[in-house]
Structure formats: C-alpha cells, structure tokens
Amino acid sequence: MKHPAHMSAACARWMLSRTLRAACGARRGHWAPAARLALPRDRPDVPASSWRWSPFCTAVDDTEQAAAPKRKTKHDPKAHGTIGAVGRRIPHREVQVISETGENLGTMHRADVIRVLDERGLKLVLLSERKDPPVYRLMSGKQIHEEQLRLREKQKAKAAPVQVKELTFSSGIAPHDLSTKLKKVEGWLEKKNHVRITLRSGRGGSAVNLDTNLEQIVQQMEAMVGFVSKPKAIRDGQAAMCVLRPPSAKELSQKQKNKDDPSQSDDSTSRAPESRAAVPPVSETDTTEGSTQRDSDANKTLT
C-alpha cells in the first residue's frame, strides 16, 4: 500500500498535467508527465490565443508599443567648434564642393573629388551635412590649422566674459606718461579686453574739443583698435570718454587689403610730382645762361 504522502504528490502531478493539457489544447486521452510537457513558447503549432490567458502566463498589454528607434542626428562640425579632414572615405555618393579659394565647384561624385584631392594635394573638410547634397570644402593643411585656431579663439571669447579696463588722465599729461599709458592700453587689448578711456580737462586747462583731442590720442597708438563707443563729450563738456575693443577679423583683413592695394601708392606717387611742380626746379640750362650773362657783364666792366 502506497504512503498517503506519495499518493498526494502523484495526485498533484496528475492535476497539474490535466490543467496544462487543457490550457495548451492537448488531445483527449493523451497524457504526459508534467515534466515532459512542452511550454507554449516551445510549441510553434499552438496559437498564442490558447495560452495568453492561461493561469500560468502573464497577461500582455496589446497597446504596448515597441520603443521608437533613436533618430540619427546629422553631424555639423561648426556646432562643436571643431574642424578636420574627412580623409578619402567620403560617406556620401555626391557632394557639393567648394574650392580652397572659395569658388563653388558644384555637385561632384566622390570619385572625382578624390581625384582632385590627389592632383592638388589638398584635404577635404565637411562644412555642412544638413544640406542636400552635403557641402564639403577643399583646404590645405595650413588653412585647416588657421581655421582651428580661429574656432578655438572664438570658443574662448564666448566662454570668458569680456573685462572692461579703465584708464583716466588729464589733457595736460606729459608725452612720456601718455606713451606709457597707451602701451598699457595696447597690452589690455591684446588680452581681448575692452578699455574705457576718460580724458578730463586739466587744472586751468581748456575744456574745448576734448572729444577731438581724445580721438587724436587714440590715433597715436601703434596697434589697430576698434570702437565700442567713439569719443564723445561727457560731464557737460568737462571730459571725454571712449571704449576701445580689439579689432575684428573683418577690420584686420580690410586694413591688410588697403595696405596691399597698389592704387593708393599710385595716388601718392602721382600727388608727389604735383607738389614738386609748384616750385619748378632750376634746370642746367638756366644755370648756364646765368653764368654766361655774368661773365659778359664782368668783361664790359674791365674794358
């Protein structure tokens, strides 16, 4: 006779087998031990509707949706303040190409772009991937280095707040002291600071045209400067004030362009003969005639 504990265990296994067989849609009269029964996920012939709501399964919410895939953002090198060559592996089939001089070469196949790179010894830099087609530029190694320095300086300028230095002196300042103060101003400007200069009238000095005097003082500086605020009279004309800043890249390029422009030197050269023409030089003929006349007069006197 079997022990009651063994009988209760056998009954439990039998009940479990019957329940699983009914839930999984097994045929009548077929019996298998619970340990050998295949779960619904292992039986592809069992529809999901037969086991989804079984007491041994977890309910699934039909409204649950799969997580949306992350959208790939396009790379913009200028957004991160970096620039670099992409090499020969151009990910786009057709690209818009800008030459090293800024000329638009139009849309080119990447094979043609690589051929141009090899012929000219240049590098390819991504300018904008957001456009269709993406925009690339041909650049030399020197151009890339200069652009990296420019972007680095631009980032530093954005990160650090601009400091405003102040300098005050009177209109009766000695030339040596004025030169020392102007050199100090140039040092502040080299460090990308702004400088507020105040020129006040001296004791017993005239307070007329202080703004003009201040502008003339600024023009004595050797370094090029820009104005945040141009010289103007303040304190009812008893002083003048201006705010200086470092020159922008556009202003520096314009100055260099004017310096390299030969038309200005031609104008100065053309003006020089005109000034000299105001006082006509003495020619060799005039000198000779004058000496001959003096000799004849001397001979008449002797005779």
Image (tube, rainbow, N blue to C red):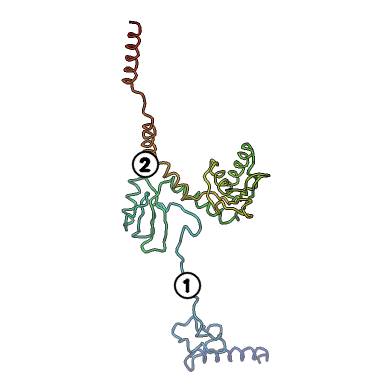
Position of residue 40 relative to residue 205, above or below, is: below
The residue carrying mark 1 is 69
Position of residue 80 relative to residue 165, above or below, is: below
Which percent across, then down, holds residue 164? 62, 52
Residue type for callout 1:
Pro
Position of residue 280 relative to residue 179, above or below, is: above
Residue type for callout 2:
Ser
Judged from the image, the secondary structure of the residue bearing numbered disc 2 is helix
Quick one: 303 or 52, which is closer to the camera? 303
Judged from the image, the secondary structure of the residue bearing numbered disc 1 is loop
| Residue sitting at x 44%, y 85% | 45
Quick one: 248 or 203, which is closer to the camera? 203
| Residue sitting at x 63%, y 44% | 171
The residue carrying mark 2 is 263
| Residue sitting at x 39%, y 34% | 275
Which percent across, then down, holds residue 223? 53, 42
Which percent across, then down, holds residue 249? 48, 50
Location of residue 91 (image quadrant): bottom left
Closer mark to the observer between disc 1 and disc 2: 2
